[in-house]
Image (cartoon, coloured by chain):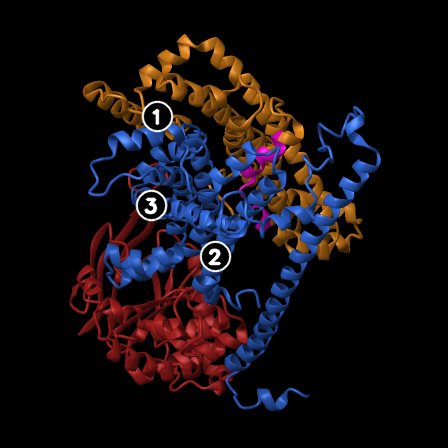
Amino acid sequence: MNVIDIQGATKVFNPGRSNQVEALAEIDLAVEHGEFITLIGPSGCGKSTLLRLIASLISPSTGSVQVNDKPAEQARLDRDYGMAFQTAGLFDWRTVTKNIELPLELMGWSKGDRRRRASEMLELVKLSEFAKHHPNELSGGMQQRVAIARALAFSPSLLLMDEPFGALDEMTREHMQDELLRIWKETGTTVVFVTHSIPEAVYLSTRVLVMSPRPGTIASNISVSLGDRSAATRDDPAFFKKVTEVRIALREVEE
Amino acid sequence: MNALKGFSAPVAAGVVLFGVWQGVLSLFNPEGFVLPAPSEIVGALIDNWDEVYHGARITGFVVVSGLVAGIILGIIAALLVTRFRTANETITPLAVAINAIPIIALAPIFNNWFGLTSPRSNQAIVVALVFFPIFINTTRGLTQVDRSQIELMESYAASRSRITREVRIPNAMPFFFTALKLATSLAVIAAIVAEYFGGRQDALGPMITQSAGLTRYDEAWAAVLAGTAIGAVLYFAVLVIERLAMPWHSLIRARIDEP
Amino acid sequence: MPNTDTMADTDDPLVREHRIKQQAAQEQRRDAVVRVVRQTVTFVVFLGLLAGLYTGYKAFGQAIDDRQHDWAVIGSVLPRTDDLNMPPVSEIFGQFGETPGGQDQIYVKILFDEALFTLREAFAGFMVGLVIGMAIALALAQWRRLEQGLLPYVIASQTIPLIAIAPIIVIWGRKNFDVFPWEWQDWMSVSIIATYLTFFPVAVNGLRGLQSPRPENQELMESYAASWSQTLWRLRLPASLPYLFAALKIAATSSIVGAIVGEISAGVEGGLGRRVLREAFNYTTGPDRLFASVLGAAVLGIFVFLVVTGAERLVVGRQNRGAAA
């Protein structure tokens, strides 16, 4: 069964007006359970738009988007996916625990269940000792970990991530990538991940989708099988080969 | 076309607002209602034009002179205080607290100092009321400067006054104008209220109380309308000056910052 | 490396980075305490300086005998210095302990009671203004068309010197407000003026605050399929609090101004405004009492400002802590 099924989806912003933009053209995409998909492409290629179509934060102009075998809108109402953004987007006025509890609150979980779940999630992202801190007291990388914990709190079968590590420095970023892979393996969640970075895409995913500039299409579909990742993977010739492959694919779409 | 678009919503809302106001009052015509219909107010304004215009000139003079003096003093004080770091750190919070004092309560003291029938005491009230927001916000603007811009200027070995001119003053402009917009409407209110306590008896303030005392509400409101007009003209003038002074600051939005 | 032992108990680089950051925040908190102490000391010193300046100027004026001359400055820009115009500081403060004619209470107690009365008027008006202001902010935030249409009028409403018609409101209140289950009191009319001065900053800053959440926070709530009221209570209202408090500081002080001026022009007895006016009438026999009552009004204004500032620290203090570290 496919977690995501997109058929002939297009997106046109401001149709019929002078500022009309054709963002996506004829996207077909099927994502299987347990995959780690990255979307990569030049600025303005519609990566984020595609992610928001899956999340049903915007609706397609034509075509259909199915998540868990139902329309994406229904999947959103059923809270089938968790989402993380480029900025951690934590609520400044809530403690770390209360931030993670936010979706559970909205889903009507009891207080005790929420507390228990939040402390499990904090353990997962290794922030237990910061449960009562406020976001502003944490570093950027830690904030992003809280955001991931929040996205995973209600055990969604799908995790949508929009350049979540884009604002982090290189060292923190590599650290967070390892964390994310560990969590992905532990939870068995399907991930769709938008990024600008070629090494990040190759290191994380089972499949890299290279998108072409506006109107966005999926130009190539590169499977990655590097086995279990570790620090050694980053120096592996097979890793560099894949990086080069993606780079060439990107260069082709830019021309 | 686009310029028209920006005005259509306020104009439509205005037509509805004044239409409802006029309609309700002419339909039900409540006895002794404090708020006369717009047509009655305009009628009273036309009937008493000479008197109202005369009062508005007197009150307007108090407002404008007080405003100008308050602005000049506020800017001078801000420039002085930002020259010395410790002075700034101690005086600014002090000024913020003092700004919370109901300055209008000083009116009786000022009246005794400057004479009961002299507009000087009313001016003093306006000056005191305008001074604090201008001083506080200008000081903030002069000090809350992007560190890297200062460092850039220092890397050019720019002099202190040069840095003030090139970086601090442009940075302070939006802060200053925010305070100025607040100060203009405060100045009108302060002048009119101060005129209750003393000052010239043919100004707008006494005109309002006297008309109200005789239950001639339409005349009282005609005088209020004149006060509103002074405030509106000044506010609009500030908007124009802001535009001219800061052509790079494209967004002119309604906002109140902490004074 | 002196710091090694405090840093070595974790190998998570993020946690290590956090520890360093926290140390900086702690130092900053210590600085904040120092700042409060320093500000209090400054305030006292400032009051002393002010009293010194006042006394010094008075002594100077007496020395040059300003009463006998027609100076250009003294008497127009600066006051004359006789005891009627500038009663000595000691006598002004001495008034607080006196019992003015026919009263069995000392003056400071009378002022305190009257300040409470004025505070009640201002607070009632302030609360109503807060509700109305937030309602307007919510409506304008909800419908963009409404914002475009009405915001100019909300701003224009503040150029109307409503204080000016305070007496009319009192008369009107007595005549027309018998629709309420309670009897209309004159002080409620004064509260209306405080309301009018309060609602505006609340509406303008509330609107800005409600619109302040970043797009990704809005999207997050949408991704949870959160309802309008859930988004309001969990995102937009909390996000508006810092903006709101900036407005409340202005509103609290203007509600006091509104109450004082309202009392004065509406003839409502029992508050500080009326007290100042009465002392102004009796100026020639007790100038020091006028100065003392004006000081009382000043203290009330600063008190209200400090209360709101303290509430702000409590409510939005923690979320900002470390933000600057």
Q: CA distance from mark 2 to mark 1?
A: 41 Å
Q: Which residue is labeled 3 in the image?
A: C128
Residue in view at x 39 percent, y 57 percent: C239
Magenta segment: B96-111
Q: Which residue is mark 2?
A: C307
The three-letter code of the residue at mark 3 reads Val
**Which residue does the image show at 56% across and 26% down from the upper left?**
B198
Whether A117 is drawn above or below C155: the answer is below
Image colour for chain C is blue
Measured as percent of width and height from the top left, residue A231 is found at 49, 86
Which is more foreground, mark 1 or mark 3?
A: 3
User: Regarding mark 2 in the picture, which secondary structure is present there?
Assistant: helix
Kindly indicate which chain is depicted in orange in the rendered structure. B
Q: CA distance from mark 1 to mark 3?
A: 29 Å
Corner quadrant of residue C79: top right
Q: Main secondary structure of the magenta part?
A: helix
- The correct choice, above or below, for B82 with respect to A30 in the image is above
Q: In the depicted view, which residue is nearer to us: B100 or A216?
A: B100
User: What colour do you see for chain A?
Assistant: red
Front-most of A19 and C236?
C236
Q: Which amino acid type corresponds to the residue marked 1 in the rendered image?
A: Val
Residue behind mark 1: B11
**Residue type at the position of mark 2:** Val
Choose top left, top right, bottom left or bottom right for residue C222.
bottom left
Q: Chain of mark 2?
A: C
